[in-house]
Image (tube, rainbow, N blue to C red):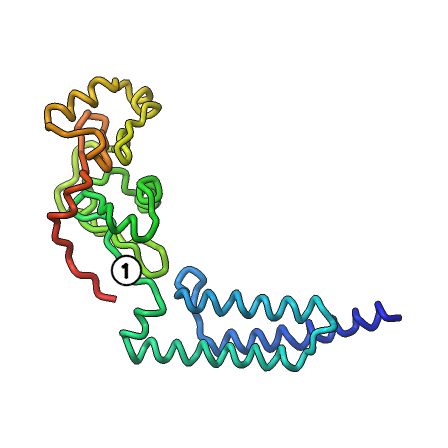
Amino acid sequence: MELLKDLGVVMIRVVTIFPLMLAVTLFMGRRTIGEMPVFDFLIIIALGAVVGADIADPNIEHIPTIFVILLVALLQKLFSISSIRYRRFGKLISFEPIIIVYQGKLIHKNMKKIKYSVDNVLHMLREEQIFDLKDVHLCVVESNGRISVLEKTEPPQPEAAISFPIIKEGKIEVAILSGLGISEAWVRQQLAQRQLALDSVFLATVDQNKILSITLYEEEAHQSLPPIIH
């Protein structure tokens, strides 16, 4: 009998809590998951924890749970309105857009801030149908984690080039070299001709025509980036 009673309580809570959650979601505003600011994401986690505990444990009081849900929804609405009205406050509770590629070069210090690796950036660019860093004038990681890319306006090459990373963060990618039929000696010779040390190279790529593009760690210290409006 006790089990049936608990199951009845859970059923009533499911029937009452989901319409409430639907109303709260509509109240908080329409927004896709990928566009959620950090604070909204935390709100969802909090609501999920509260609702999950309430449904799973019949011993938890139901009315306080409803009160918490309504309170969290009001808090989210207050923060949302405040972030729109006061831009400085909005910046405090969300990530700012940040430049990670400028004029075909990776910006190491900005990648370090957001914990992005070379592989992360190259993968995201490939998803945008960009296979060569040299084609990128500007790449920005937006506050929702997606990238916005402005390609260079130079005339397209007769044959689309795909670049391959042969040096990442001062280390030669031997497996990629063997696939391209390029020797490690050739890479070191190219660096020697440019009077560059291997550990000073953040990223080096080469295309099918063996055209080498290099981004140095120290380059960004002398590079002026355009402002990004948030």
Which residue, given by chain and number where applicable, does mark 1 sit on?
Answer: 97
Instruction: Check the image and name the residue furthest to the right.
Output: 1
Residue at 74% x, 73% y is 59
* 162 up-or-down from 222: above or below: above
Question: In x, y percent, where is residue 42?
Answer: 47, 66
- The quarter of the rendered structure image containing the N terminus is bottom right
Residue pictured at 56% horizontal, 74% vertical: 22
Query: Residue 181 placed where, x, y %?
Result: 28, 18
* Residue toward you, 40 or 130: 40
Which residue occupies the foreground of this view, 159 or 198?
198
Depicted 55 relative to depicted 81: above or below: above
Residue nearest the observer in this picture, 88 or 120: 88
Q: Does residue 115 appear to the left or right of 196 in the view shown?
A: right
Q: Is the C terminus in the top left, top right, bottom left or bottom right quadrant?
A: bottom left
Q: Residue at x 27, y 74 (%)?
A: 88
Q: Position of residue 137 (x, y in %)?
A: 17, 48
Name the one closer to the observer, 190 or 163.
190
How many badges with numbers are in the image? 1
Percent position of residue 133, x then y: 22, 40
In which image quadrant can residue 55 be found?
bottom right
Count residues near mark 1 (Cα–Cα under 10 Å), then give few for <14, some for 14-19, many for 20+.
Answer: some
User: What amino acid is labelled 1 in the image?
Assistant: Pro
Q: Is residue 80 above or below residue 44?
A: below
Mark 1 lies on a secondary structure that is loop
Please indicate whether residue 193 sits to the left or right of residue 79 in the image.
Answer: left
Asked which quadrant contains residue 108, the reply is: top left
